[in-house]
Image (cartoon, coloured by chain):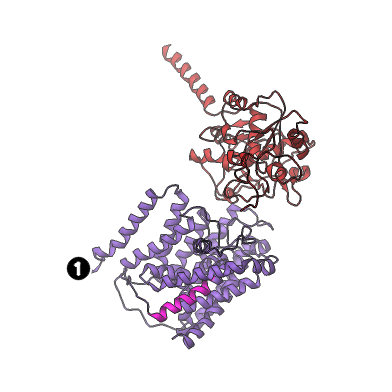
Chain colours: A purple, B red
Amino acid sequence: MNLKSKIPSIKNYTGIIFVLFISFLVNIKVSNLDEVSYLSLWLGISFGIVLQKSRFCFYCIGRDFIEKKNSEGLLGIITALIIGTLGYHLVFGAFLLEPLSPQLPPNAHISPVSIILVLGSFFFGLGMAIAGSCISAQLYRFGEGLLSALFAFIGIIFGFIFAYKIWNYLYLNFIYDSPTIWFPHYFGYAGSIGFQILVLSVLALLFFKFHRKQKKQNTLSWWKIKWPTYVGGILVGLIGSAAYLRVAPIGVTAEIGNISRSFAEFLNIMPLRLEGFDTLRGCIRVVKTIFFTDNGLFIFGLILGSFASAIFSENFKIQIPSYLEIKKSFIGGVFMGFGSMIALGCTVGNLLSGIMAASLSGWVFLIFCSIGLYYGWLLKNKYLV
Amino acid sequence: MKIIKNLVILTITFLLSSQLASAESKFLVDTNWLAKNINNPKVKVIEVSVKPGVYEKGHIQGAVNFKWHTDLVDTVSRDIISKDKLQNLLRKSGVNKDSTIILYGDKNNWFAAWAAWVFDIYGVQNVKLLDGGRAKWEAEKKPLTPIASKVKSGNITLTKTNSALRARLSDVVAVAKKKSNVALVDIRSAAEYQGKVFAPAGVPELAVRAGHIPGAVNVGWGNAVNKDGTIKSASELKKIYAAAGIDGSKPIITYCRIGERSSHTWFVLKKVLGYDVRNYDGSWTEYGNSVGNPITNLSGTVWGKI
């Protein structure tokens, strides 16, 4: 054996060097960058690497299950949720000694459960199936060179603006009175952990039952091999918990919401006020203060991390989209933008950060997003081929 | 002999310097004093920050969190917390009759000073501000913890209410109409005082008129602090306020927009300089909305005019 085949060649490291250089630039060039924002950038980079290496794409995972009876990805999500549940409760116990109602732990994505959440989740699922991946996967696949993601982003911004336009009506009529349910209020911390792990374990058993053995992957060099999804899951759970402790729950829509708002303001179509926004705890923020928000840096880091990882693993490939792909990405993006805005988060901010936080809203998102995904998959196979 | 003599001198110098390095006055403690007394069971640290969620991410060890939006006010009518509720809150937070309360918060102790004012109204004893607040503690890289600590209930009892520390609308209207000989200090920014803006940037415009109460002088709250956020020395403060005509020769009322930044100046004038001072917590959001009262607007801003 020669050494050459055991380690990747020099050009594989270019992405890593590029990212180190960019993060160095951010550190010295961005004025007022505090430790937390810089950490947010690095958590984003780590998240991007993990998503890229383990192909942590919610739609792909769902599709693999529907089409190939492959449960591996779903089990990866379950792993992330179990690790995250433990991590979050560890932090909760530090922040709030006792989970006494109506106190909620700060910043956690514990949002109201309403018919709007149900609709938003469903539209989001529909959108991610049409566009071929959810927002976080669009971001990491953009880092891999998938240019159709740009059209998805444009669609997402349109979806956001449309949701902003009708938000006040939805909030005052449907969301205002709806309950915010946090399991530790009802079961205590230990009970909440037990309940979540029980439900997640039952789901895991079901997925094992339906799982069919898959064809083995070709044996590749170690740097090209996809990480098993459960490894991705463990790391996603850890990153989620660390981010909650030090920065904010992970999410990828807050900064997109900011950009959409700026764009809507530019077009003069932004409502003067979004009712109730200060009081809701989700992944959407409309207070834009500085150019580099913590969430903006997280998303930027996500793309960077994925880019470095893709170059290193030889997965990077500029993919020019066809007209059909552009159409699908855009339409799917509109649905995702609209859905995630009214549901106050996407598969990351709601499904991951919501369930880890033991919020019923996260579970509701999971259920209706999955239903949306299934219908979206049917629709796409029928009309958009 | 010489060695012993030197040792004695050294010891005395050391003792003196350590005394100087961590200072505790009647109403202020510095960060080093608090760092040394952090495990002192008689010391009760309370954080009152403007920004929600700051405390949980990291606070001074053993500190409890008071939220100014909900804990220290009546949440239905616009008023400060009632005596009974404050007593419950303090007991729940482990404050005893003989506790020394150290208040601190973000934004230069704005709401910590406001809490000190509320505590003073209800006669809470031994209340001090951490000089420089959270910002100085952080700047000195002193430790913060995200871990809330369990506290045993305290036994503090509140008996009296001293309303004389609080100015009401009628009190300031009397000054505006020159019916009362009181000095008014507007501690807001010059732009707010002159009526150029209705409220500082990033804050909702809760008053429909701009300007200030006739007769008020403008001394921004920030004039009272050094660069590191600590409160200036008494002699410096005397000079600064005297230059604006505030010399303690007559009673003083401080106000701002909602009464929190003015608590900072209230604290400085009342506690550090010992003047007779009331805080007008209705402040501009009450006065600037009140009907039929005189206003001085140097800028001629008209609300709603395009």
Image quadrant containing the C terminus of chain A: bottom left
Looking at this view, is A250 or B237 the one in front?
A: B237
Instruction: State which quadrant residue A111 falls in.
Output: bottom right
Residue extending farthest top: B1
Instruction: State which quadrant residue B293 falls in.
Output: top right
- Amino acid type of the residue that numbered disc 1 sits on in the rendered structure: Asn
* Residue A106 to residue A366: above or below: above
Residue extending farthest bottom: A382
Q: Please say whether residue A136 is one of the residues in the magenta stretch.
A: no
Residue B282 picture location, percent across and down: 72, 42
Residue B244 picture location, percent across and down: 62, 28
Looking at this view, is A236 or B218 the one in front?
A: B218
Specify the segment rendered in magenta: A322-337
Instruction: State which quadrant residue B123 falls in.
Output: top right
Asked whether the viewer can see residue B45, the reply is no
Residue B249 picture location, percent across and down: 70, 23
Which residue is denoted by mark 1 in the rendering? A2
Q: As drawn, is B66 to the left or to the right of A257?
A: right
Asked whether the viewer can see residue A313, the reply is yes
Marks counted in the figure total: 1
Q: Please say whether residue A331 is one of the residues in the magenta stretch.
A: yes
